[in-house]
Image (cartoon, helix red, strand yellow):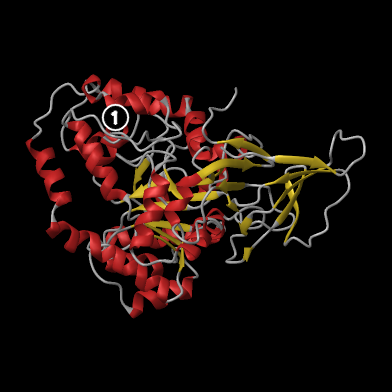
C-alpha cells in the first residue's frame, strides 16, 4: 500500500488549489522518462509536468511518492461492453447450445446494459482509464457522453452496430430482437443507412466484422459503405485475421485494424498500405490463455482467476468459479479436444507464432500499434485481461518502454482523444496510475499498480468504489 507524506505551501493549510505529486519516476506516454518528477494538478487537469526543478505554486498540497512510478492511465482500444466475457453472450462460439434457453442469453445481454458500471469499475481498478468499444449494441454509443464526466467510469469511445457479410442464420443468432448488434450487408443503400445512423448517434468509427473477397457483390457494397464513411467524416474499423482481407481493408480506407494478421507473415505491400493510410494496428494476441480457461469452465472446471485486487463483478466471478450453475448439458468431447489443441506445440508454431512475428515486424517498420484485448468475448474479462495482452506483446519482442506508449498515447489516438488524454502533459486530463515497480524494465510490473487517478481523483485499486 502506498504511503503518502503530505505537506502544504499555504499558510493556513486549508483548501489547497493545487495537488502536487513529487519524487516518482514518471513516463509521460510520449516515450519520455522523468526521474524525480513533479506533476501539478488543478481541477482535474494537469497544470505542469517536469523534473525536480519545476516550480511548485503556492497553495499546493504536496504528496511525496519518491520510489514509485507513474504512467498515464492505460487505454484498452478493443472492448465490447455489451458482452460479458463469458459464453452467455457469445453462445455460438461454444459450438453447442449449452445454455438453459434463449431467455438466458437475452437476460445476459440486458444485464450488461443495466450493470455497465461494474465493468467501468473493473477497468479503472485495473488502471484502464479509457476504453474503445469497437462494435456492439447501439446503446454503447451513448456511453461516450454519460461516462465522460463520471469519475467512476473510464472515458468511452464506441462505434455501435457492426456491418458484416456473415450469414443470416449467424446474424440472427447474435442479435437480440431489438438494439441489433450486427447488420448483414445486403445492399448499398442499407450499408449507407447504417453508416448514417451510427454517425448521427455520435459513433467513433464504423466497424466491419469480416470481409468476403470472393463475394463480388458484398465487396461492391463495401465500397458504398467506405464512401459514406468518408463523406460523413467517420472512420472505418475492420476485423480480420487474413492478410489479403487486411490489404483489401486498407485499400477501402480502413484506419484501424483489430485482431491483426494471424494466418500469414505480412509483406511490404501490407506495410506500405498501412503507412499510406496512417492506420493503427491492434494485434489482440493475448486471447489464447483466456480461451483455455473459458473452455475449462464449459466442462465444469472452476477457473483460477488472477484477480488479486478483486476487481471482477460477482456475476462474472460466480460463472468462472461455479460454471455448473449455468450449463445445462453439453457434449464435452469437442471442448476437451479444443483445449488440447490450444495447448499443443503444433498450435503454438502455426497459430501463436505468426501473429507475434507480424507484431514484431510491424513495430520494426514503424507502424503505429495500440493495445486492445477484445474484452467481452469468452475468456477476455473486462479490466484484468489487459495485463495478459501487454505481457504477450512483450513476449513478441516489443520493449516495455515502447509498450507504455502503445498502451497510453496510441490508445488515445485510436479513440480520437489524444488532444486531452493519453499522455501526461500540460492541459490534459489528470488520468494516471501509480506503480510500485518500474514498467519500463518489465511490462509485467504494470501489475504492481496501487492507485488510479481519473480526472484528478486518486483512489487505491484494492478497494471497491464507494457509491
Q: Is residue 412 above or below residue 138?
A: below
**Quadrant of the drawing holding the N terminus:** top right
Toward which corner of the image does residue 247 lie, by quadrant?
bottom left
User: Which residue is drawn at the image coordinates 13% and 53% (left, top)?
Assistant: 344
Quarter holding the C terminus is top right
Task: State the image quarter where residue 324 is shown.
Answer: top left
Determine the image quadrant of residue 384: top left
Give the side of residue 417 with respect to residue 277, left or right.
Answer: right
Q: Is residue 414 visible?
A: yes
Q: How many marks?
A: 1
Question: Which residue is the site of mark 1?
Answer: 320
Which residue is located at x 24 percent, y 19 percent? Answer: 325
Left/right of residue 94 with respect to residue 272 in the rendered view: left
Residue 290 percent across, percent down from the top left: 29, 43
Q: Position of residue 206 (x, y in %)?
A: 46, 52
SS assignment at label 1: helix
Residues 23 and 121: in front is 23
Farthest right residue?
11
Up-down relation of residue 54 to residue 449 (above or below): below
Q: Foreground residue, 316 or 135? A: 316
**Image side of residue 329 versus residue 288, left or right:** left
Crowding near pointer 1: few (<14 within 10 Å), some, many (20+)?
many
The residue positioned 24% from the left and 22% from the top of the image is 326
Position of residue 45 measured from the top left corner of the image (x, y, whole percent): 73, 48
Compared across the picture, whether 299 is left or right of 361 comes to left
Is residue 134 in view?
no
Q: Position of residue 70 (x, y in %)?
A: 60, 52
Amino acid at each position: 500500500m502506498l504511503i503518502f507524506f503530505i505537506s502544504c505551501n499555504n499558510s493556513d493549510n486549508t483548501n489547497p488549489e493545487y495537488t502536487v505529486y513529487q519524487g516518482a519516476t514518471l513516463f509521460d506516454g510520449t516515450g519520455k522518462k522523468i526521474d524525480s518528477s513533479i506533476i501539478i494538478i488543478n481541477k482535474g487537469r494537469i497544470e505542469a509536468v517536469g523534473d525536480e526543478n519545476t516550480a511548485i505554486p503556492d497553495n499546493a498540497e504536496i504528496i511525496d511518492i519518491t520510489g514509485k512510478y507513474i504512467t498515464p492511465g492505460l487505454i484498452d482500444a478493443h472492448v465490447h461492453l455489451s458482452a460479458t466475457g463469458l459464453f452467455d453472450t457469445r453462445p455460438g462460439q461454444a459450438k453447442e447450445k449449452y445454455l438453459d434457453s434463449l431467455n438466458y442469453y437475452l437476460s445476459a445481454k440486458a444485464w450488461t446494459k443495466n450493470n455497465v458500471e461494474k465493468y467501468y469499475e473493473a477497468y479503472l481498478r485495473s488502471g484502464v482509464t479509457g476504453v474503445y468499444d469497437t462494435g456492439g449494441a447501439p446503446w454503447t454509443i451513448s456511453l461516450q457522453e454519460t461516462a465522460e464526466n463520471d469519475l467512476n467510469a473510464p472515458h468511452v469511445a464506441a462505434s455501435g452496430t457492426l456491418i458484416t457479410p456473415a450469414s443470416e442464420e449467424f446474424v440472427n443468432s447474435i442479435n437480440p430482437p431489438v438494439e441489433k448488434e450486427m447488420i448483414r450487408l445486403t445492399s448499398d443503400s442499407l450499408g449507407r443507412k447504417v453508416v448514417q445512423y451510427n454517425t448521427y448517434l455520435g459513433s467513433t468509427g464504423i466497424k466491419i466484422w469480416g470481409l468476403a473477397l470472393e463475394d463480388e457483390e458484398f465487396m461492391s457494397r463495401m465500397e458504398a459503405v467506405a464512401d459514406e464513411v468518408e463523406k460523413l467524416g467517420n472512420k472505418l474499423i475492420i476485423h480480420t485475421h487474413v492478410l489479403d482481407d487486411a490489404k483489401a481493408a486498407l485499400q477501402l480506407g480502413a484506419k484501424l485494424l483489430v485482431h491483426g494478421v494471424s494466418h500469414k507473415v505480412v509483406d511490404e505491400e501490407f506495410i506500405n498500405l498501412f503507412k499510406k493510410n496512417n492506420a493503427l494496428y491492434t494485434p489482440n494476441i493475448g486471447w489464447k490463455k483466456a480461451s483455455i480457461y473459458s473452455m475449462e469452465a464449459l466442462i465444469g472446471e472452476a477457473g483460477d482467476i488472477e484477480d488479486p485486487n478483486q476487481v471482477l463483478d460477482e456475476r462474472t466471478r460466480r460463472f468462472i468459479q461455479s460454471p455448473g450453475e449455468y450449463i445445462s448439458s453439453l457434449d464435452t468431447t469437442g471442448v476437451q479436444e479444443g483445449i488440447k489443441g490450444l495447448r499443443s506445440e503444433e498450435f503454438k508454431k502455426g497459430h501463436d507464432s505468426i501473429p507475434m512475428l507480424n507484431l514484431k515486424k510491424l513495430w520494426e517498420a514503424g507502424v503505429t500499434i495500440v493495445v486492445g484485448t477484445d474484452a467481452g468475448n469468452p475468456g477476455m474479462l473486462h479490466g484484468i485481461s489487459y495485463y495478459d495482452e501487454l505481457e504477450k506483446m512483450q513476449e513478441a519482442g516489443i520493449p516495455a518502454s515502447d509498450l507504455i506508449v502503445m498502451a497510453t498515447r496510441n490508445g488515445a489516438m485510436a479513440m480520437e482523444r489524444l488532444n486531452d488524454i493519453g499522455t501526461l502533459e500540460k492541459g490534459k486530463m489528470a488520468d494516471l496510475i501509480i506503480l510500485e515497480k518500474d514498467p519500463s524494465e518489465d511490462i509485467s510490473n504494470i501489475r504492481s499498480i496501487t492507485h488510479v487517478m481519473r480526472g484528478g481523483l486518486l483512489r487505491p485499486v484494492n478497494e471497491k468504489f464507494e457509491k
